[in-house]
Image: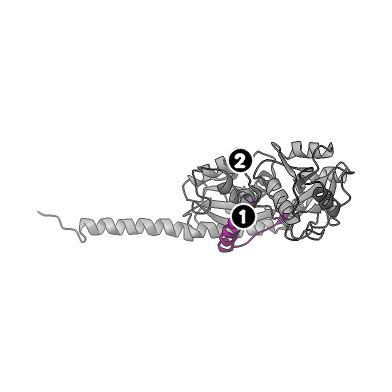
Amino acid sequence: MKKTFPWSRRQALTIAAALAACTLGGAHAQGAWPGTQPIKLVVPFTAGSGTDIVARLVAEKLGPALGTSVIVDNRPGAGGTLGAAIAAKAPADGYTLLVHSAGHLVNPWIYKGLSYDTLKDFTGVTPMASLPNVLVTSPSHFADVKDLVAKAKAKPGGLNYGSAGNGSATHMNAEVFRLAASVDAQHVPFRGTPEAMTEVMAGRVDWFFAPMVSALPLIKSGKLKALAVGTAGRSSALPDAPTTVEAGVPGSAYLFWVGLFAPAKTPQPVVERLQAEVAKIMVSPELKERLEKLGAEPFTMPSAQFNKFIADETAKAQQVVKAAAIKVD
């Protein structure tokens, strides 16, 4: 006797596929993600860096908020491009994310042949914190910013400024300042911030835009002198220090930030949930207090706004790299 079925084989397969898609999509929509599967935050810098510190502060709170574990995976190298490449190639399922800095938007213009596209292969979830840089010198070097600019103009190419490496945030901040002040000076790149600050304290390097988190203890101990902060507004960590704009250099503000990214095509409900949870974490009294001790401040925005911000800042980074002829040796 011939068996009969209410649907054809093709209809049955179509319905099964549709049910599977609904189940997966519904899981994200109903908040089943992430379940018990751990989430990995790829940090493309060494442990103890400003980006790493922010990532670990967030991971500590994000895990309980999502009901799972959140781990930090440090993958340093090549200005943050090695870790970014790992995150770009990860499945877009919300379980591998990238915590990067403003340097993420500089790298496309100074590193040739990247295996990923900064704008196309990532979606911005939210910025998390801004970390001001502070213009520091040895205590007896300059009276203030106007004195620094005057001496640099009086001796074109005769003064020098340090950075934590070509294309780093400390370098970008210095170039934005130098171009705005119209001064000619020699760039001296170092392997990192500690080496640059040591040379500034010794007087062998004239100035350096140091990360606040690194420079604050040395400023308070009198080993470094803070002339100004590089941001548009003053820092609560150094309220008496003017901004470089207030100190007489219009157009010199530079914003260094740390943000959360996901591989492109990560489901929108996952992106929105991450953004909402991180935003709550960053403005919590405990996190704000811990950030302030590091000279950092909460900095968040919705994903769509962040992606517009990323596009705009990438274009600005290209202009600075071109104007300052920044290259990676």
Give left or right: position of 305 versus 26. Answer: right
At a point 55% along the width and 48% down the height, the residue shown is: 97
**Residue type, mark 2 in image:** Val
At a point 59% along the width and 39% down the height, the residue shown is: 78
With respect to residue 26, does 200 lie above or below? above
Confirm whether the magenta stretch covers residue 313.
yes
Judged from the image, the secondary structure of the residue bearing numbered disc 1 is: helix
Q: Main secondary structure of the magenta part?
A: helix
Q: Position of residue 226 (x, y in %)?
A: 84, 49
At a point 53% along the width and 57% down the height, the residue shown is: 271
**Res 44 seen here:** no
Sort mark 2 into few (<14), some (14-19) or many (20+) by Cα contacts within 10 Å: few
Give left or right: position of 142 versus 116. Answer: right
Return the residue nearer the eye: 312 or 274. 312
Give the total of numbered labels: 2
| Residue 284 lies in quadrant | bottom right
Q: Position of residue 208 (x, y in %)?
A: 77, 45
Q: What range of the chain is rendered magenta?
A: 297-320
Confirm whether the magenta stretch covers residue 305.
yes
Image quadrant containing the N terminus: bottom left
Q: Which sits earlier in the primary sequence, circle 2 or circle 1?
A: 1
Sort mark 1 into few (<14), some (14-19) or many (20+) by Cα contacts within 10 Å: some
Looking at this rendering, what residue extends furthest in the left direction? 1
User: Which label was assigned to residue 319?
Assistant: 1
**Residue type, mark 1 in image:** Gln
Residue placed under numbered mark 2 in the picture: 328
User: Which label was assigned to residue 110?
Assistant: none
